Image (cartoon, rainbow, N blue to C red):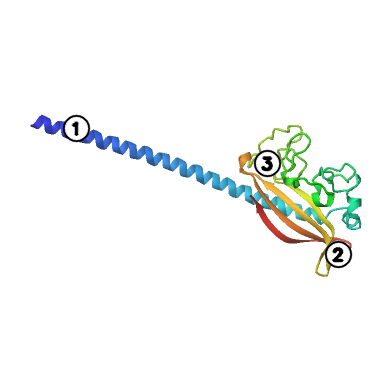
Amino acid sequence: MRQGARGVVLLTALLLLLLMSALVLGLSRLLRDEQRIGSQLDDAQRAFQLAELGLQAGEQALAKLPFAAQVAGMSHSALRQSESPFTLSCRQSRNPAGWQQGLCLSATLARQPIAPPWQRLDESGVALLHPCGVALRLELQSVATAGRCPVVTTGPWFWSDPHYLLELLDPQYVDGEQRGLLLRVTARGWGRLPDSAVTVQSHVLLLPESTGSWRVRRLAWRELR
């Protein structure tokens, strides 16, 4: 009887040990999953914040657009010509330095049934809003992609700096008593990984001031899904 009782106790102890081991393994796996999910959420939040920074940079850049007055006086047909500062390819070598890419003509103005620029690829198959595309860059890290594309060198804090496109929608948009340039700014930010991209967009009105400068007024904002 004593040997039988000892056997039962031993078997019970082994079962309890197995149960505790399974419980510990389950808890450790749960903790790893929670850490992974938390890391992904942090990365998504970082990407969103960087995308918003890129959007603000794009809006601020519009106030310094060197040919805003010229564009405001151009007809729709003139904007479709090869010398237009805004093009379907978002490239224009005739523009001043710093403005030779990232300026897009909307498909509506161009009268072309094509996708919007943030969804398009260039002739080499690279997305226009990719760091190796034609988008303008908000430089936050010292790592540059020039000469390394289409492979992006990951920065020390996030995969890539935010990039943005400036798209002309209407050169003579009227909002109440105000007339100006209607543009769409689309910006993309990344976290630590390339698939953590977040894209945000705003519609802005570029208004002339009596001093000869231009003022930017945001009309709408959204996150693209």
Residue 90: x and y in percent read 81, 44
Residue sticking out furthest to the top: 3
Say whether residue 138 is visible: no
Say whether residue 35 is visible: yes
Residue sticking out furthest to the left: 1
- Residue in front for this viewpoint, 204 or 170: 170
Classify mark 1: helix, strand or loop: helix
Classify mark 3: helix, strand or loop: loop
Residue 10 is marked as 1
Question: Counting residues from the N terminus, which is met first, the one under dot 2 or under dot 1?
Answer: 1
Q: Are marks 3 and 1 in contact (CB under 8 Å)?
A: no
Question: Counting residues from the N terminus, which is met first, the one under dot 2 or under dot 3?
Answer: 3
For label 2, the residue is 209
Classify mark 2: helix, strand or loop: loop
In space, the residues marked 3 and 1 are separated at their CA atoms by 59 Å
Q: Are marks 2 and 3 in contact (CB under 8 Å)?
A: no
Q: Quadrant of residue 192?
A: top right
Q: Amino acid at mark 3?
A: Ser
Residue 73 is marked as none
Q: Are marks 2 and 1 in contact (CB under 8 Å)?
A: no
Residue positioned 68% across, 35% down in the render: 153
Total numbered labels: 3
Q: Amino acid at mark 1?
A: Leu
Residue 197: x and y in percent read 64, 44
For label 3, the residue is 160
Q: Is residue 221 left or right of residue 2?
A: right
In space, the residues marked 2 and 3 are separated at their CA atoms by 35 Å
Q: Amino acid at mark 2?
A: Glu
In space, the residues marked 2 and 1 are separated at their CA atoms by 89 Å
Residue sticking out furthest to the bottom: 177
Give the crowd class for mark 2: few <14, some 14-19, many >=20 residues within 10 Å: few
